[in-house]
Amino acid sequence: MSLISTDKVTYEYIIRDKNGSVEGINRAVDEVDMTVEQGEFIAILGSNGSGKSTLAKHFNALLLPLEGTVYIDGYDTADSDHLWDIRQTTGMVFQNPDNQIIGTLVEEDVAFGPENMGVKSKEIKERVKNSLESVGMEKYRYKSPSKLSGGQKQRIAIAGVLAMKPKCIVLDESTAMLDPAGRKEVLNAVMELNRKDKITVILITHFMEEVINADKVYVIDKGKICMSGPPRLIFSNAEILKEIGLSVPYATLLSNELRKRGIPLRDGIVSNEELAGNICQLLQTI
């Protein structure tokens, strides 16, 4: 049984004018089928307005499909009797960490979720400690979140989700407001959780470089999944990505241009490290 599966999921927004009158319907998610297995690192790519964030909210039952079905660990998200089972299985981390952080101290914020789940005090302390250590923030336990950088705040938000012991973390544009250093900081923490603790990760993003280590990438456009597969396969379709407002990692773009100019670089390069390594190999043959 897959951890997450969707069957022809459709969701629509009503578009209203400034007076509240209905202007039309926006089909934000259009008959989406996908599966996510336990321990996978899945990326969902799409330009602004593609429907990727709307889809993400279905994985935590924040939204329910107009048509179709979403199953989370075997539970139908439309079954209100299992709402808390679903939300304990899939934790959400949103774009702005300030909207998720409510404690005056880091440890208070991380403890908030388990406290509301009725976890005993002794276990909460252990969960707080373990969660902060998992994202490299244990030394900030007694600090005020307001004194932290954007990347540090986002790692605290992730720790708060981890303290509830989910099987899956969904990061909905969670690095969009961060600078490159902050994005790298958060992604490294998430990838470590995926590798070390086998926590399923679903990364919603429009930054190409963030998905090169994913097991599988889904590309969504106008509410539909238009491509899916491993990163190298997705980025080999640069022209299709360009048509829907996306690009490819800079290393892929540069290696493609160099090949056009006659430099025999190998196909399918997606990272700076691969590009540098291939160039070094060529230089050794000169």
Image (cartoon, helix red, strand yellow):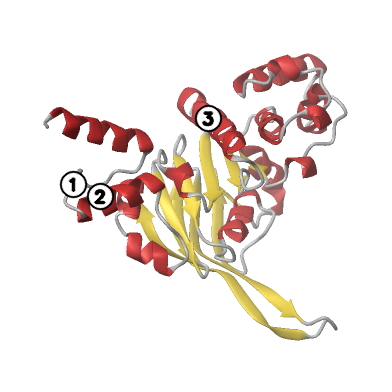
Residue kind at label 2, given as amino acid type: Leu
* Name of the residue lying farthest toward the front: 286
Front residue of 86/58: it is 58
Q: Name the residue located 46 percent from the left edge and 60 percent from the top edge.
A: 246
Q: Nearer the viewer, mark 3 or mark 1?
A: 1
Disc 2 + disc 1, Cβ < 8 Å: yes
- Return the mark for residue 41: none
Label 3 SS:
helix
Residues under labels 3 and 1: Cα distance? 32 Å
* Name of the residue lying farthest toward the right: 104
Q: Position of residue 268 (x, y in %)?
A: 26, 46
Left or right of 112? Residue 163 is left
Report crowding for label 3: few under 14, some 14 to 19, many 20 or more residues within 10 A (C-alpha): few
Q: Would you identify the image quadrant in which residue 281 lies?
A: top left
- Residue to which mark 3 is pinned: 188
Sooner in the amino-acid sequence: mark 2 or mark 1: 2
Front residue of 200/141: it is 141
Residue kind at label 3, given as amino acid type: Asn
Q: Position of residue 201 (x, y in %)?
A: 52, 39
- Residue to which mark 1 is pinned: 263
Left or right of 5? Residue 250 is left
Residue kind at label 1, given as amino acid type: Ile
Q: Quadrant of the N terminus?
A: top left
- Say if 270 sits above or below 197 in the image: below
Q: Position of residue 234 (x, y in %)?
A: 34, 54
Residues under labels 2 and 3: Cα distance? 29 Å
Q: Name the residue located 66 percent from the left edge and 46 percent from the top edge.
A: 177
Label 2 SS:
helix
Q: Position of residue 179 (x, y in %)?
A: 62, 40
Front residue of 121/249: it is 249
- Residue to which mark 2 is pinned: 258
